[in-house]
Amino acid sequence: MANLKDIKRKINSVKNTEKTTRAMKLVSSAKLRRTEELAKRSRIYATKLTNMIDEIALKIQNLGEDANSSVYFANKANPKRIDIIFITADKGLCGGFNSQTIKRINGLIESLKSDDVEIRLSAVGRKGIDYYKFNNIELRREIIGLSSAPNYEDAASFISELSEEFASGKSDKIIMVHNGYVNMIAQEVREEQVLPIDISRLDGKAKSDSALEIEPDDDNTLLNALVKRYVEYSMYYALLDSLAAEHASRMQAMDAATNNAKDMVKSLSVKYNKARQEAITTELIEIISGMESMK
């Protein structure tokens, strides 16, 4: 017969867990609304900036091979040094949010791995940092706290060194990976080539007929400044997108945990009632047996 005190203790423990998971779900829900709104506003600017960069790239492409294009648009056929920036959460309890990102990074590394290719990792977020350190994989740059509280200055500072190395020829490609927000119930891992500007994505676009004109810029000062802003904001927007996805994933995980706790309480309550009935029946049998023996 099950011990009634042990079952009662388990019920109370699960109920306390249910309260915690419900509270975490409510907190994530409130944070998601704020972060989602900020991400939506930032997406508008990011989209406009990306469209402008694509427009410039299309103009440069249409000018032909002799055009005085920026180094940021020069795609090398066989890159020898590739930088991968990835974003994970600083905290857990958010379902498969972090594991999906890490799985994509590992797959990307495998697809790029070669004897003459050097792959360098730069990490944002404690969970990704801990994973690669545990597996003795070197991280070139790492930062904790930025994925939980994104701000433009720190995002720009984190990626600026890599973009400067790319401009000086010390790096051939920069790729960014993060788990992005789709809606309240869905997230998707996004992989973006930050530098060089991926001109191949313009293959399906028609020849530009917009009013945008490229004036002579012998040292590409203006163009490089614009690309720098594009790179910095791409990093910042990825952080916001990742944070919104993290809150959505945590909200789902805590909702599932709360429902599981409720089901467990019901199951344990049934078990407790059966054990209590067994105890009462056993006690009655003992009383009746004692009375019969006294006759």
Image (cartoon, grey):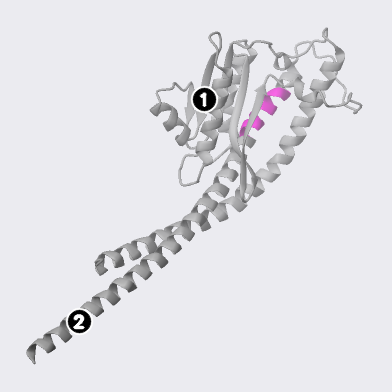
Horizontal side of residue 275 vs 168, given as left or right? left
Disc 2 secondary structure class: helix
Q: Distance between the Cα atoms at labels 2 and 1?
A: 71 Å
**Residue 182's quadrant in the figure?**
top right
Answer with mark 2 or mark 1, whichever residue precedes in sequence.
Answer: 1
Query: Which is the main secondary structure of the residues drawn in magenta?
Result: helix
Front: mark 2 or 1? 2
Is residue 13 shown above or below 231?
A: below
- Taking the view exactly as shown, the residue that stands out farthest to the bottom is 295
Magenta part of the protein: which range? 226-236
Residue nearest the viewer, comparing 128 with 276? 276
Q: Which residue is drawn at 74% across and 40% down?
A: 44
Q: Do the residues labelled 2 and 1 touch (CB within 8 Å)?
A: no
Residue nearest the viewer, comparing 287 with 202? 287
Three-letter residue code for mark 1:
Ser
Q: Which residue is drawn at 62% across and 10% down?
A: 169
Q: Residues within 10 Å of mark 1 (few under 14, many from 20)?
A: many
Percent position (x, y) of residue 167? Answer: 64, 14
- Quadrant containing the N terminus is bottom left
Percent position (x, y) of residue 122? Answer: 52, 25
Horizontal side of residue 124 vs 231, given as left or right? left
Percent position (x, y) of residue 146? Answer: 52, 36
Q: Which residue is under mark 2?
A: 285
**Residue 192's quadrant in the figure?**
top right
The reply to whether the magenta stretch includes residue 18 is: no
Disc 1 secondary structure class: strand
Is residue 72 shown above or below 239?
A: above
Q: Which residue is under mark 1?
A: 122
Three-letter residue code for mark 2:
Ile
Decide if residue 150 is in sight here: yes
